[in-house]
Image (cartoon, grey):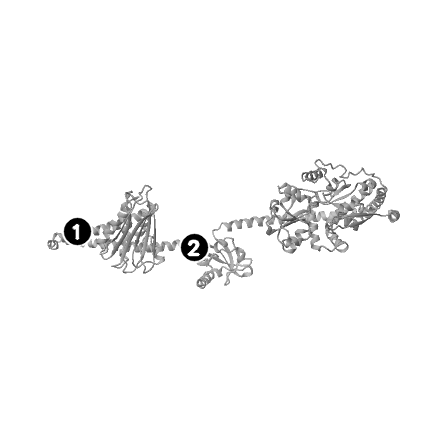
Amino acid sequence: MATRFFPAVLALLLGLLACVAKVSTAQAGTADLQPLVLQLKWYHQFQFAGYYAAVEKGYYREAGFNVELREAHPGLDPVAELVEGRADYLVSGPGALLARARRQPVVALAVVFQHSPLVVVARQDAGILSPPDLVGRRVMFMPESDTEFLAMCRSEGVALDGLIPVAHSWNMQDLAEGRVDAMSAYLTDMPFLLQQAGIPFTLLRPLTYGIDFYGDGLFTSEGEIATHPERVKAFRAASLRGWDYALRHPEEIIDLILTRYSRRLSRDALRFEAQAMQELILPRLVEIGHMNPGRWQHIADTYSALGMLPEGFSLDGFLHQEQAPVFWTPRRLHAVWVTLILTLVVATILLYFNRRLRTVVQARTRELSLANTELKIEIAERQKANQALYYSERRFRALVDNIPGAVYRCALDADWTMDFISDAVEDLTGYPVVDFVVKRTRTLAGLIDPAEREALDARLRDCLGSGAPCTLEYRIRHADGDTRWVYDKSVGIAGDGGQMQREGVMMDITERKQAEELLRKLDQMKTEFISIAAHELRTPLTSVIGYADCLLDPLIAGGLNEERRREFLLEIRAKGEALALIIDELLDISRIERGEPLKMQRAPCDPAALIAKVVGTFQMHAPGHRFETRLESIAPAVLWADAGRLVQVFENLVSNAVKYSPEGSRIRLESRREGDTYEAWVRDEGIGMTPEQIERIFDKFYRADTSNTAIGGLGLGMSIVQQIVKAHGGTIEVRSAPGAGTQVRLTLPLLPEVGETASVAAVDTAP
C-alpha cells in the first residue's frame, strides 16, 4: 500500500510545483523593467565590482530594473550628472558632503569602503617620509576632492601655501620622470603600477595620521527618494547584494570586467586592486553598506576645520533613513508558497528514504561497533609498545648524551662510513651529524692525517681479528683548520646482514696531549737549567778556591807582595759577589713563581744618577767597549723607587749589551723625561736577535744563544728585569734584528711634584 501511495503523492506535488513555477515565470515576463542610470566616479575597474555583479547575476533585473553603468573620465563632474537628472544614482566619496553644503540635493544611501583608499605617493629617492617633508616640493593633487590629503596636512601643521601645487594629470609618468615630487593616488592601483615599473616609492597614508574618512559609497537625490522610495530601497539592496557576491568571487568579476567592460588594466592589476579593497571594505568585520552617523559628523567637522564647510554643519537630510518595510508583499507571499511546497516534497522524500536508511544504519552500526572494539584493543597494545619504545630510546639518548665523547657505529670500510654517531661529533670535528650520517658528504677517515691511516688500519685489523677492544690515538683536521688529538676505543660487532661493524666512543684529548708536550719541554728546560746553574756556580767557585789555595799555601803566599795579595782578595770578593748575584736571581725567580711580590725598598731617587753609576762600573770591568751616555737629570727626586732594584735592571741590560757585542763596539745609554714618565734606552751594536728570540726574551731560563760557545748566564736576568719594571708601574720593550744590534726601552712613572728644570750632559767615555 505504502509503495503505491508514495509515487502518486510525489507526482501530485511535482505537478503543483510546475504550475507555480509557470505562473511565476509568466508574471516575470510581463513585468516592465525600469531603466536607471548609475553614474560611476572613474573608468571601469574593480573599484565598482559590486555593481557589475548586480547586473551580471540579475539582482537588478529581479528588482525590476534595467541599469546602465556609466563610467566617468577626467573633467566630468559625477555629482552634476546626478543633480542635473542625467543619472539616477551615483558612486561618490565623502566629498558629496561639500556638494550638499552647496545646496545640491545629494543623499547618502550606503557606504561600501569603510576606509578611504587615498594616499600620497613619492619616489623613494625624494626622501619624503612624512607630511612636513612635502614643504617646498612639487605636489600633484586635486584641492576640491583630495580632502583627506588636505586634512592630513592640517593635522601635521603643514601649510598648503608651503607646497608647490601641480594640476593633476592622472599620469604616473609625471612622478616616474621627476616632473613632480609627490602625487595623490589610490592605494588600490598606484603601488602595483610603480612596482611593475621598478620604481621604489614611499607612501603617506592619511589614516596613519588619524584622518579616517569613508571611501566610495552609493548616493541618490532627494527627488528620487521622494518620488520612488521603494525603488530606492530595492536598488540599494540589489547593489549591496552584488557587492557581497563580488567580494566572494573576485576572479569571476575580473573575467567579467575584461570581457564586457574594459581592458584598460591587466588581469594582475585587477587582482591587486581586488586584494587591496578587502582591507578597505572589511566585509568580514563590517556589514557592507553600514554608515555611522557619528563618523559622518566627524568628517563634516574636519571639513569645517579646513574651512570647506560652515561650522556646525548639520547632516539632516544627508543620511537616508529607510521607512519600516511592509512585510507581506506579493513577492514574499509567492516565495513563502513555493517554499512550503518544496518543503513538503523534500519531507516526503526524506521520510521514505529514512525508513530504508534506518535498517541499513542499524546493521552497519553493529558491524562498526564490533570493529571499533577490536581497533581499540589494537590501539591500546600499540600505544603500550610505543610508550615502551619511547622510554627505551629516551634512556639510550640520555646515556649517549652524557658520555664524555662521541658514540658511534661504523662500517669496516676504508672511509669508516658512519651508521650512527652522536651529536658530540660536532664539538669534536666542527661538522654536524648530518654530514656523516644523512648527507654522507664527509667521513671521519677523511679527517685523519693520511700519514697515520696505514698504521691505524693495521692496528684495527690486528685488534678486531683477535676479538679484543681496539684503542687508538690519532690526529684529525678540525673544521676551523686546527689539529685535534682523538682517543678512540671500539669493539667489533656483527651488524645487519652479518657484516662486521665497529662500535665505540671517541674523545678529544688535545688538551691532554698539549699538557704532555708542555711537561716534556719543562723537564727538558729543567735539565738544561740544572746543567747551566751547575756550570755558572762552579766557574766562580773554582776561581774562589784557586785564589784561596794560593793564599793558604805558604810557599806561594810567601812570594806575594801586598799588592798581589790584595788583587787575589779582590778577585775572591768579585767571584763571591757573582755567586751572590746568581743566588739572588734564583731567589727572585722563586718568589715570582710562588706569586709573591719582589722585595722593594722604595725611596726618592734619580734614575739618571743610577745609570751613570752602572756605566762607571762597567767602564772599569769592560774597557774594550765604548760607552756613550746622554742622560737627563731632574733634581731633586724624580722617582719613588727601589734604587737597588733599578741598578739591578740597568746592570742586566748593560751586561747583556757587553756580552753580545764585539770589543771596540759602542754601547749607548740615553734617558729623558716625556711628560709624566722617564724613558731610558740601552743600545748596542751586537749580534742582534730574530723575531722568535725577541718573543721569548722574557721567558724564564731562556738564553738567546744556546750554542757550545754561548756566553754564561742562567737565562733569568731579563725575566727578573721585566718583573722589577712592572712592579714600579713601568714598561719595557725590545727591538732588534740579526746583525743590527739590540735596543731596550723602558719607561718609569714620575712623581707629580717633580720639578720642571733639567740639565742634559753628553759624555763619551770610550778609552
Please indicate whether residue 50 sits to the left or right of residue 172 in the image.
right
Measuring from the top left, give residue 710's x and y in whole percent: 28, 59
In the figure, residue 742 lies in which quadrant? bottom left
Residue ID at (67%, 43%) = 148
Residue 54 screen position, x and y as percent: 78, 48
> Quick one: SS at disc 2?
helix
Position of residue 69 relative to residue 329, above or below, is: below
Kind of residue sitting beneath label 2: Thr
- The residue nearer to you, when weighing 582 against 742, is 742
**Res 578 seen here:** no
Answer with the quarter of the image where residue 707 lies: bottom left
Q: Nearer the viewer, residue 585 or 122?
A: 122
Which-is-in-front pick, marks 2 and 1? 1
- The residue that label 1 is drawn on is 569
Marks 2 and 1 sit apart, C-alpha to C-alpha, by: 58 Å
Residue type beneath disc 1: Leu
Q: Nearer the viewer, residue 368 or 173?
A: 173
Q: Which residue is mark 2?
A: 510
Dot 2 alpha-carbon crowd within 10 angstroms: few under 14, some 14 to 19, many 20 or more: some
Which numbered disc flags the more N-terminal residue, 2 or 1?
2
How many numbered callouts? 2
> Vertically, is 438 above or below 730?
below
Residue 470 x/y as whole percent: 45, 58
